[in-house]
Amino acid sequence: MLKDACQEILKSDSKIRFAGIYHHSELTSCMREGTAPLLTELESVTSIRGSVIRWGSRKLLKHKLGYPRYALALYDDLFRVTFPLTNDDLLLVSIDSDCNITDVISQIIPLQQKLIQELSA
């Protein structure tokens, strides 16, 4: 199910290069065909750990700011977007920087909501 969800996210826009689901402390991910990873496996693990910690920090402020819908980081070559799923589970997406990020995110949100329903069932 998680691998299929990653594939569905990848297919939603040609600018999406990576989709990963961090669920129960394990990562299931897919990369766009023909795309080389930018990070080593160790760098990826470190980055995911950082995302989990940062997301936890965001949740601490929800009583003042509201629940975070997603977090967006812009790098020179790509966008990285973190979406909440259930409990401490996250959807992590990397997107080429030469896109309309608002349009891409709006395509991902319904898939995020579908995934939340599947994980909650």
Image (spheres, rainbow, N blue to C red):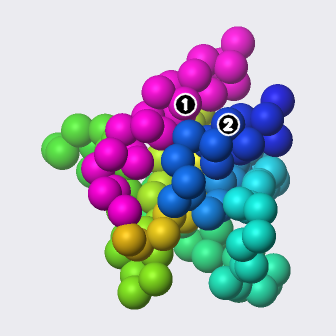
Q: Tell me the quadrant of the picture where the C terminus can be found.
A: top right
The residue positioned 52% from the left and 47% from the top of the image is 13
- Name the residue tied to disc 2: 8
Instruction: Write the start and end of the magenta stretch as one range.
Output: 99-121
Q: In which quarter of the image is residue 72?
A: bottom left
Secondary structure at badge 2 equals helix
- Which residue, given by chain and number where applicable, does mark 1 sit on? 111
Please identify, in this view, whether the residue under mark 1 or under mark 2 is nearer the observer.
2
Overall secondary structure of the magenta section: helix
Q: In this rendering, is residue 82 above or below 68?
A: below
Residue 71 seen: yes
Could one spot residue 57 in this view of the protein? Answer: no
Element on which disc 1 rests:
helix
All told, the count of numbered labels is 2
**Horizontal and vertical percent for residue 116?**
58, 26
| Side (left or right) of 111 relative to 62 | right
Give 54 or 21, whichever is nearer the viewer.
21
Give the quarter of the image for residue 18: bottom right
Which residue is at 51% across, 59% downward?
A: 15
Q: In this view, does 43 lie to the left or right of 12?
A: right
Q: Which residue is drawn at 76% across and 55% down?
A: 30
| Amino acid at the residue labelled 2 | Glu
- x then y, percent, for residue 34: 77, 70
| Mark 1 → mark 2, Cα distance in angstroms | 8 Å
In the depicted structure, whether residue 60 falls above or below residue 111: below
How would you rate the neighbour count of disc 1 (Cα within 10 Å): few for under 14, some for 14-19, many for 20 or more?
Answer: some
Q: Is residue 27 left or right of residue 20?
A: right
Closest to the observer: 22 or 61? 22
Please report the residue visible at 65 percent of the width from the left and 54 percent of the height from the top: 19
